[in-house]
Image (spheres, rainbow, N blue to C red):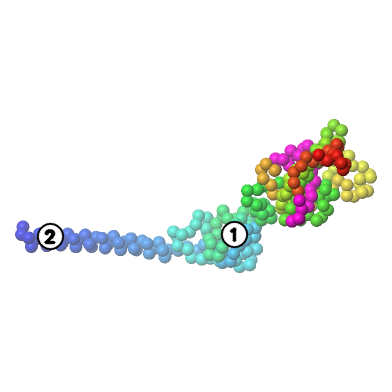
């Protein structure tokens, strides 16, 4: 075979390969185009939905709409029907154009803590019961700073052993409704007084160690709180007992 015939054969092979490559590319482009334009309708938000917001209320307010989404972009659980979301609330913020999926909706109890109790990072929330007179009346509100004071009690004689500041400064997250606490010792005189035995739950933000201290102190005696402001000074000391209660006997 001379040189000219060899070149013709090579050219024919190259041409055949080129045609094959063009066919493969065109086939892939057709598939990509089909995938891009083959869409389905799903529910999406057209306005911001806040955590705790009812799906039913948001639907009534027109915060959802049907949108065409490429099949390859549809999230798991996204659909064009709203039945699965009825009676639920948003568990997290949902932004405009975001697809609605079941994992972002649930019962109101699932978001209650996050919505109503803005727990600082690294802290946990616990509740303590304090007598009405021991919580500075009705002046304590969420956001207030308080010191928690513990009085240890001799369970045999019911006499106080020592009173010390347990937690120097913690933030109040919530103040629960007052309720009468019946310890079985109340009588007619207490009923006439009306306010005796009334306690309130204060929810505070604490560290793990502080939570453990509070729970131990509850079992060992009684807790009270002192309201603080920016000028308040609270520092640890030996506390007050029978020996140093009066002036001149301080440690």
The residue shown at (53%, 62%) is: 98
215 to 17, vertically: above or below = above
Q: What residue is shown with label 2?
A: 9
Q: Residue at x 79, y 48 (%)?
A: 225
Q: Residue furthest top?
A: 156
Residue at the spot x=85%, y=36% of the render? 243
Q: Nearer the viewer, mark 2 or mark 1?
A: 1
Q: In the rendered structure, find residue 93 and report the number of the disc placed on it.
A: 1
Question: Dot 2: within a 10 Å radius of its alpha carbon, few (fewer than 14), some, or many (20 or more) residues?
Answer: few
Mark 1: few/some/many CA within 10 Å (<14, 14-19, 20+): few
Mark 1 residue element: loop
In this picture, residue 216 sits left or right of residue 77: right
Q: Magenta segment range?
A: 211-233
Residue 195 lies left or right of residue 55; in this view the side is: right
The reply, left or right, for residue 116 in relation to residue 80 is: right
In the rendered image, the quadrant that contains the N terminus is bottom left
Q: Quadrant of the C terminus?
A: top right
CA distance for labels 2 and 1 = 66 Å
Specify whether residue 53 is painted magenta: no
Q: Position of residue 10 (x, y in %)?
A: 14, 60
Residue nearer the viewer, 10 or 35: 10
């Amino acid at each position: 075979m001379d040189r000219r015939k060899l070149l013709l054969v090579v050219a024919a092979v190259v041409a055949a390969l080129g045609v094959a490559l063009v066919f493969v590319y065109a086939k892939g482009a057709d598939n990509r185009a089909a995938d891009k334009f083959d869409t389905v309708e799903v529910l999406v938000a057209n306005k911001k939905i806040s955590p705790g917001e009812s799906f039913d209320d948001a639907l009534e307010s027109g915060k959802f709409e049907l949108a065409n989404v490429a099949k390859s972009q549809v999230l798991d659980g996204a659909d064009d029907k709203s039945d699965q979301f009825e009676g639920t609330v948003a568990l997290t913020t949902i932004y405009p154009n975001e697809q609605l999926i079941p994992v972002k909706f649930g019962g109101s109890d699932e978001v209650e803590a996050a919505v109503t109790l803005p727990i600082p990072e690294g802290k946990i929330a616990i509740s303590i019961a304090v007598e009405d007179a021991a919580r500075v009346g009705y002046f304590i509100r969420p956001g207030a700073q308080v010191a928690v004071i513990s009085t240890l009690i001799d369970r045999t004689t019911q006499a106080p052993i020592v009173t010390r500041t347990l937690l120097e400064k913690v933030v109040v997250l919530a103040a629960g409704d007052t309720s009468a606490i019946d310890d079985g010792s109340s009588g007619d005189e207490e009923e006439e007084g009306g306010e005796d035995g009334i306690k309130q739950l204060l929810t505070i933000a604490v560290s793990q160690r502080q939570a453990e201290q509070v729970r131990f102190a509850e079992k060992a005696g009684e807790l009270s709180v002192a309201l603080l402001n920016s000028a308040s000074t609270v520092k640890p000391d030996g506390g007050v007992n029978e020996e140093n209660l009066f002036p001149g006997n301080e440690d």
